[in-house]
Amino acid sequence: MASNAAVPFWRAAGMTYITYSNICANLVRNCLKEPHKSEVISREKVHFAFSVWKEGKPLKPVTRSDSPQE
Amino acid sequence: MGVLPGHVATIAELKPGVLSVHEGNNVNKYFVSSGFAFIHANSYADIIAVEAVPVDQIDSAAVQKGLADFSQKLNTATTDLEKAEAQIGIDVHSALNAAITG
């Protein structure tokens, strides 16, 4: 049986919709005129911490951030 | 795709491109990065997008540069993922270009 209805090229390459949508949004943000560009450029930035859990206990938390460490 | 009152309830996936909103004789054009349009049975429509900007906020020089950059990247891409990313870049910048010149 042939594959289901043609998948979009990004899904065929292993990308999820949310990754695709965020890439598109970033590209649009980078193509704006000032001052709009400076206002929105921070929307892309993420800052979060997570811990891997092992045997019911969290290990040391790891912080991922786009903003410079203060 | 045009939506008037009484449109059948629809969920549509949007590609990067221009969305025109007509209010009376007023037309506002927005560039939508991608997303969905939900048209409800009571003639309300919702547009869900990560980024939607008025078309006059788009910088033409940045668009041309982006288009050239990603066309270049597509030629040098090796893995499927790199090719997909380059293709997305080309699609988005082509749509941006059409929006500012259209």
Image (tube, coloured by chain):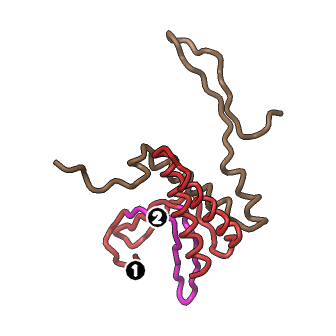
Chain colours: A brown, B red
**Residue B14 location in percent, x, y?**
45, 64
- Measuring 49% from the left and 45% from the top, which residue is drawn there? B81
**Amino acid tagged 1:** Leu
* Image: A68 above or below B41: above
Residue at x-position 74% and y-position 68%: A33
Are dots 2 and 1 on a single chain? yes
* Subunit that carries the residue with mark 2: B
What chain does mark 1 sit on?
B
- The spot of residue B73 in percent (x, y) is 58, 54
Residue B15, which numbered label?
A: 2
Residue A7 percent coordinates (x, y): 34, 53
Mark 2 to mark 1: distance in Å? 20 Å
Q: Residue at x 65, y 21 (%)?
A: A61
Q: Residue furthest front?
A: B76
Q: Residue furthest right?
A: A70
Which residue is nearer to you in this view: A48 or B72? B72
Establish if A60 lies above or below B26: above
Asked if residue A61 lies in the magenta stretch, the reply is no
Which residues make up the magenta segment? B12-33
Looking at the rendering, which quadrant does residue B60 occupy? bottom right
Q: Is residue B48 left or right of residue A58?
A: left
Mark 1: which secondary structure? loop
- Quadrant assignment, res A29: bottom right
- Nearest the viewer among B101 and B31 is B101
State the mark number for residue B4: 1
Q: Is residue A64 left or right of residue A1?
A: right
Which mark is first along the chain, 1 or 2?
Answer: 1
Residue B19 part of the magenta-drawn span: yes
SS for tag 2?
loop
Of the residues tagged 2 and 1, which is closer to the observer? Answer: 2
